[in-house]
Amino acid sequence: MDEPSLGFVLVDAARLFRGRTDRAFDAAGLGLTAGEARTLAYVNFHPGLRQMALAEKMNVEPMTLVGFLDRLEAAGLVEREADPKDRRAKTVSLTPAATPYLAAIRAAGALVRAEATDGFSEGERQMLRDLLLRVRANLAREHKCRDER
């Protein structure tokens, strides 16, 4: 191989991006991991969603999500309640205490995105986002098909 493949570059970039994001969260004093911050963001995008549906949207294992939710609930940032349609299922919502965390997550995320895309035009940023969304959708579809076998 004369140069790294797309897979190597994508994995390296994701690892570096995740590490830089963790450092930005630390600098902001959030006391959250990237996974916990991502969970807060997804709960904000999808309030009142069942835990299982939230795990599916996030493309994480349900037990991984439970760990994030346990820590976020202990910190008073989310609450889980029995779903009125099925008391065995739990829905997840943000508490008012999550509002300043979401603002800090947005700010830290914007800083890291700006660093990662320094020198990119707005069109290039949008193209990169669109292409990565397609990669994610392709891989999520394959993951879902494998799980259904």
Image (cartoon, rainbow, N blue to C red):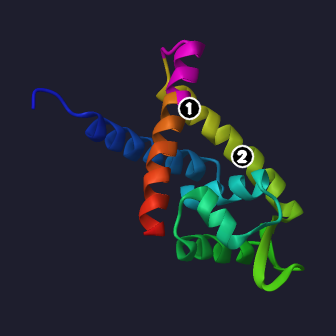
Residue 98, by quadrant, is: bottom right
* Most common SS among magenta residues: helix
Residue 99 in the image: state x and y as whole percent.
83, 53
**Residue at point 49%, 60% (across, down):** 144
Can residue 94 be seen here? The reply is yes
Q: Which residue is mark 1?
A: 113
98 magenta-colored: no
Which type of secondary structure does the marked residue at label 1 adopt?
helix
Which type of secondary structure does the marked residue at label 2 adopt?
helix
**Start and end of the magenta stretch?**
119-130
Q: Determine which of the numbered discs, if any, sits on residue 104 in the image.
A: 2
Q: Quadrant of the N terminus?
A: top left
Q: Which of the pair 114/12 is nearer the observer?
A: 12
127 magenta-colored: yes
Q: Earlier in the sequence, mark 1 or mark 2?
A: 2
Residue 43, by quadrant, is: bottom right
